[in-house]
Structure formats: structure tokens, C-alpha cells
């Protein structure tokens, strides 16, 4: 059911609007308010999918109501009702966040069409918000240890900027989670997050993958193809395992960072890109530089901000929270009840040497849930968690 509020000081027009909307669709619940102050009070106490608001009213005009509602509940969809002399003001309200405006006396088709479009938009906004929330849960950073709290603080400070970030740490520690958090909390969150695993792409194909190619650039290039830099335009490019990138590709990445331009393989045409680059590696890049496998100038371009993700052995106090998180997640994925772990089972898992880090812990928790008793015990850990 869609909830609509009509704020209109002229009783006759208000009644007409309420009647038209109520008769148009049985799923519309239509409330009314005789002025802006009464409307704001209703909005404070109720969530409306759409608000129709007159511009010229006593006590508080429609522009003031719009500004007040956008502060109280900024996601509220507003359609303004304007008299003939209010058209300029009505247009201006759209700059202030109104979805649209309709003129008095309202044309029936125009009114209903505007309402339908506005409600459809509201539904899309809600769906998008739920999808983002779902995506966010897949990349939740769990932990309250000093090391993880420090990383979260770093992300809060850095995310809003366009500063490049280099994330380091052993395999399985969750470096990709940091990259996702940086993107989701940034001004670029509405743009794409494009991930490239540099270690998984053959060295002879990495340049094509990153920068694209033109038809005929090499044997299998049967058509033009955009690269990941172009795909990430307006968003974030996450270069995972960048320590495995070839020196040739490193040189081109350096140029792209310096000039914000790329060239497709086989072309001499520059393509301008607006991309924030976040990189990650499990290698010691200082040592890689010393041994001639990584460019020092690229390192300094990438490592404006350094974030070191600790091993699980360095944040053992987070293991109980991680076990609970994985147990809930696995139960949700399987549509089953969450299995509990006894205190002794958790304590024993805290004492393990987690060479595979978070990834290994997740696998062990899943194994114990599948093979263990209704409540995972110390005995289950001894039987099934051994490496």
C-alpha cells in the first residue's frame, strides 16, 4: 500500500485531490493536512511514499515545508502544487529536491501520471537501498580489536577523498573488504567498483584487460573492447595482487595515474578516465622494488595511504565475533537455524594457528556446522577442525 499525504490549505482543492487519488487506486492510503505545520507534524510521525504540497499557504509556504521535510526525512518524494503565479517558484523547488510540480486547477491525467511516476521512483529507490544493504552485508568488516578499529577509523577519514590507497596483508585477511568499504563510503559509491585480480590474468593479457584493445591488435582481438579503467570511469578500480603485475603493465598503469588517460592496445588514441585506484598485495613491495620486480615510482603513486590488514593470529580477540557472524551467515544461506558453539569450542579455536586467516576460519566454521552436533563442542573441534 502506498501512503500519500496532501498538504493544501484550500479545503475544496484538498478534498478533490484526496477523492481523485483514493478512487484511482485502492492501494493508495491518502491522508490530508490543512497547512504546512500540520503536514510536517504528520511526516514526523509517519513515513509517506509521496507528499503533494501546495506552494502558497499561510503560516508556512510550500518552499519552507519542502526544506523542512528534506531535513527531517530527506528521502521523502515531494510533488509541489502551484498556482498560475507560482510557476517560477515551482521550478525552483525542483532544484531544492522536489520531484515535480502540478498546476492548479490540476489536470486529472497529468496529476495521476505524475503520482504514478513518483511512486514508481520511490519503489526503485527503496529497492536500490535494499540491494546496497544486501551487498554491504556481503562485505561486512567484523571485529572490535584495536587493529580492526584502527582500520575502520582510517577508512572513515580516507573514503571521502580521492587519495589512492595501498592495502597490504597476508592472503585471506580480508583486503578486498577494505576496498569495498572505501568505495561504499566514498562520493563514488554511485559509480562502479571494478575488481581486477592481477595474479589471475596471464601477463600477456593483463594490458588488454586493464586498458582494452582495438580490433586486430592481436590474433584473438576480433572486435574493439573497453578495458577495466574505462569500465570503472566515475567509480573505483580495485587492483588486487598488484605485486604480480608485469613491469610493462606497471609502466602503463603509472601513465594512467599520472595523466588520467589510457590507450587501448593497438591504438594511439588517448581516452580520458576519472578513476580512483585502490590496490592490494600480499607481497613486500619494498623488497620487490629492491629486486627489480616492481617500479618504485608506481609504488609511491599507489601508496598515498597505506592500510595494513593484520593476520587472524594478530587479532584473536575477534574470533568469537567472527564465528558468530559466519554461523549466522551460513545458516541464512542454507535456510537453517543457527548452530551455537560452546565456550570451550570457541576458546579452542582461538588458540589455533590460523595460517589461512579469515578464509580458513570460515571454512572450519562451515565444516563444524555440517559435521558437528546440534551445539558445536570442544570434542567436535578436536574431531573436525584439525588441519
Image (spheres, helix red, strand yellow):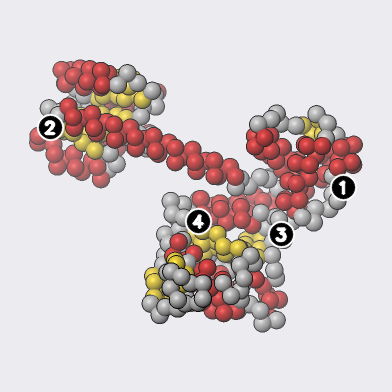
In-front residue for pair 5/40? 5
In primary-sequence order, the first of circles 1 and 2 is 2
Mark 2, other Cα within 10 Å: few <14 / some 14–19 / many ≥20: some
Instruction: Using residue 195 as the reference point, say whether residue 1 is left or right of it.
Output: left
Residue where numbered disc 2 is placed = 83
Tell me the distance, in whole angstroms, between the alpha carbons under discs 1 and 2: 76 Å
Q: Is residue 140 above or below residue 64?
A: below
Where is residue 243 drawn, in percent x and y? 64, 70
In primary-sequence order, the first of circles 4 and 1 is 4
Q: Which mark is residue 193?
A: 4
Tell me the distance, in whole angstroms, between the alpha carbons under discs 1 and 3: 20 Å
Residue where numbered disc 1 is placed = 386
In primary-sequence order, the first of circles 2 and 4 is 2
Residue where numbered disc 3 is placed = 171
The kind of secondary structure element at disc 3 is loop
Quadrant of the image occupied by residue 368: top right
- Nearest to the eye among marks 3 and 2: give it: 3
Instruction: Point out the residue furthest to the left here.
Output: 85
In primary-sequence order, the first of circles 3 and 4 is 3
Instruction: Using residue 139 as the reference point, say whether residue 173 is left or right of it.
Output: right
Tell me the distance, in whole angstroms, between the alpha carbons under discs 2 and 4: 45 Å
Amino acid at each position: 500500500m502506498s501512503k500519500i499525504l496532501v498538504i493544501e490549505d484550500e479545503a475544496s482543492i484538498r478534498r478533490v485531490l484526496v477523492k481523485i487519488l483514493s478512487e484511482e487506486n485502492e492501494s493508495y492510503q491518502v491522508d490530508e493536512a490543512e497547512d504546512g505545520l500540520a503536514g510536517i507534524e504528520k511526516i514526523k510521525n509517519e513515513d509517506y511514499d509521496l507528499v503533494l504540497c501546495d506552494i502558497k499557504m499561510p503560516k508556512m509556504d510550500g518552499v519552507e515545508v519542502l526544506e523542512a521535510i528534506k531535513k527531517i526525512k530527506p528521502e521523502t518524494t515531494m510533488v509541489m502544487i502551484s498556482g498560475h503565479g507560482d510557476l517560477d517558484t515551482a521550478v525552483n523547488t525542483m532544484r531544492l529536491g522536489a520531484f515535480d510540480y502540478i498546476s492548479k486547477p490540476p489536470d486529472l491525467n497529468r496529476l495521476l501520471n505524475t503520482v504514478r511516476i513518483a511512486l514508481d521512483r520511490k519503489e526503485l529507490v527503496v529497492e536500490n537501498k535494499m540491494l546496497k544493504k544486501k551487498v554491504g552485508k556481503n562485505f561486512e568488516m567484523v571485529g572490535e580489536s584495536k587493529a580492526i578499529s584502527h582500520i575502520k577509523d582510517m577508512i572513515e577519514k580516507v573514503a571521502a577523498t580521492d587519495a589512492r590507497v595501498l592495502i597490504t596483508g597476508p592472503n585471506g585477511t580480508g583486503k578486498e573488504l577494505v576496498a569495498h568499504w572505501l568505495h561504499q563510503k566514498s562520493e563514488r559509491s554511485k559509480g562502479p567498483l571494478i575488481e581486477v585480480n592481477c595474479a589471475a590474468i596471464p601477463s600477456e593479457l593483463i594490458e588488454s584487460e586493464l586498458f582494452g584493445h582495438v580490433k586486430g591488435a592481436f590474433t584473438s582481438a576480433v572486435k574493439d573492447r573497453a578495458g577495466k579503467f574505462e569500465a570503472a570511469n566515475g567509480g573505483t578500480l580495485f587492483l588486487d595482487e598488484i605485486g604480480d603485475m608485469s613491469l610493462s603493465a606497471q609502466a602503463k598503469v603509472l601513465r594512467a595515474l599520472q595523466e588520467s588517460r589510457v590507450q587501448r592496445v593497438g591504438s594511439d588514441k588517448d581516452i580520458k578516465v576519472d578513476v580512483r585506484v585502490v590496490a592490494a598485495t600480499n607481497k613486500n613491495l619494498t623488497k620487490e622494488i629492491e629486486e627489480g620486480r616492481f617500479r618504485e615510482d608506481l609504488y609511491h603513486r599507489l601508496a598515498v595511504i597505506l592500510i595494513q590488514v593484520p593476520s587472524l593470529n594478530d587479532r584473536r580477540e575477534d574470533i568469537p565475533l567472527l564465528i558468530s557472524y559466519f554461523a549466522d551467515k551460513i545458516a541464512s544461506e542454507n535456510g537453517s537455524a543457527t548452530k551455537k558453539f560452546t565456550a570451550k569450542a570457541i576458546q579452542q579455536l582461538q588458540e589455533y594457528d590460523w595460517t589461512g586467516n579469515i578464509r580458513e576460519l570460515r571454512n572450519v566454521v562451515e565444516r563444524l556446522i555440517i559435521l558437528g552436533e546440534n551445539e558445536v563442542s570442544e570434542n567436535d573441534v578436536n574431531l573436525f577442525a584439525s588441519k
